[in-house]
């Protein structure tokens, strides 16, 4: 990782905690407690020419506590619109590999590189995670979609904008159609399914996921 990227992350972590009133002396100790690491480890994140850096799990914990997007922490800028979009990209390297890969956030720029007909988002919750099945899309995973507004088919996995009582909601869901009745279903049974809505607009169709650790 370049020193510029590391400085961006260190700066954004500091800003994120300052937003919730944590700054100055003792800040690193508080960050360490939240992330479950030592104060020395956190101190290393802020040092120049030190290979130690926060893991994606560390950043997800910081994101939750400070209400700061993962994109803001990593890239120094907020996500686009209401869904945590990273970038549009053709993702040529990963499209040629298997359906799943494990990478670190150091490679996010490669995953989202180039222009093309795909979009990548970070899963913001576990609504599409069904334990014990092949339908397992965990929080924090990079989800890659082929951009298309074509009408979905029964059981398609889609990135969709659903309008409910005049409000727009962006979500990753499974599209179902039974006897002409359309719905958008969360694979995790703890979440409610969307069965009543004004209208919807499909943004893209699920291609594959990249598990980031």
Image (cartoon, rainbow, N blue to C red):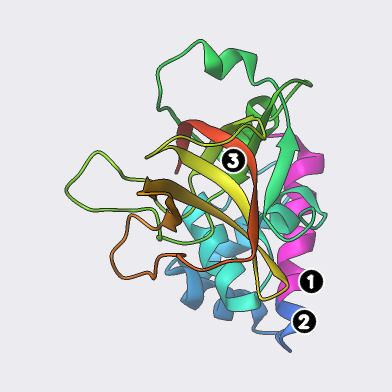
Q: Crowding at label 3, few (<14), some or many (≥20) Cα neighbours within 10 Å?
A: some
Asked where in the image residue 189 lies, by quadrant, the reply is bottom left
Position in image of residue 91 (x %, y %) = 64, 21
Q: CA distance from mark 1 to mark 3?
A: 20 Å
Residue corresponding to mark 1: 15
Count of numbered tags: 3
Q: Are marks 2 and 1 in contact (CB under 8 Å)?
A: yes
Q: Start and end of the magenta stretch?
A: 1-16
Regarding mark 3 in the picture, which secondary structure is present there?
helix
- Say which element carries label 2: helix
Residue at the extreme bottom: 21
Q: Which mark is residue 19?
A: 2
The residue identified by callout 3 is 105
User: Is 22 situated above or below 124?
Assistant: below
Looking at the image, the residue that sits furthest to the top is 96
Q: Secondary structure at mark 1?
A: helix
Q: Residue at x 43, y 37 (%)?
A: 156
Mark 2 to mark 1: distance in Å?
6 Å
- What mark, if any, has residue 31 been given in the picture? none
As rendered, which of 118 and 53 lies closer to the eye?
Answer: 118
């Amino acid at each position: 990782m370049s020193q510029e990227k590391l400085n961006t992350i260190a700066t954004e972590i500091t800003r994120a905690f300052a937003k919730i009133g944590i700054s100055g002396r003792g800040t690193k100790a508080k960050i360490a407690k939240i992330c479950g690491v030592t104060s020395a480890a956190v101190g290393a994140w802020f040092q120049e020419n030190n290979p130690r850096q926060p893991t994606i799990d560390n950043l997800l914990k910081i994101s939750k506590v400070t209400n700061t997007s993962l994109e803001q922490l990593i890239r120094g800028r907020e996500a686009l619109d209401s869904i945590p979009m990273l970038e549009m990209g053709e993702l040529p390297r990963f499209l040629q590999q298997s359906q799943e890969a494990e990478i670190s956030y150091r490679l996010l720029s490669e995953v989202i590189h180039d222009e093309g007909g795909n979009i990548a988002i970070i899963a913001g919750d576990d609504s599409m995670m069904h334990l014990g099945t092949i339908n397992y899309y965990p929080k924090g995973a990079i989800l890659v979609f082929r951009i298309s507004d074509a009408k979905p088919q029964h059981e398609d996995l889609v990135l969709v904008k659903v309008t409910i009582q005049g409000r727009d909601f962006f979500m990753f869901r499974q599209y179902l159609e039974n006897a002409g009745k359309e719905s958008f279903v969360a694979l995790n049974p703890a979440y409610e399914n969307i069965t009543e809505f004004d209208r919807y607009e499909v943004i893209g169709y699920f291609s594959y996921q990249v598990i980031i650790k």
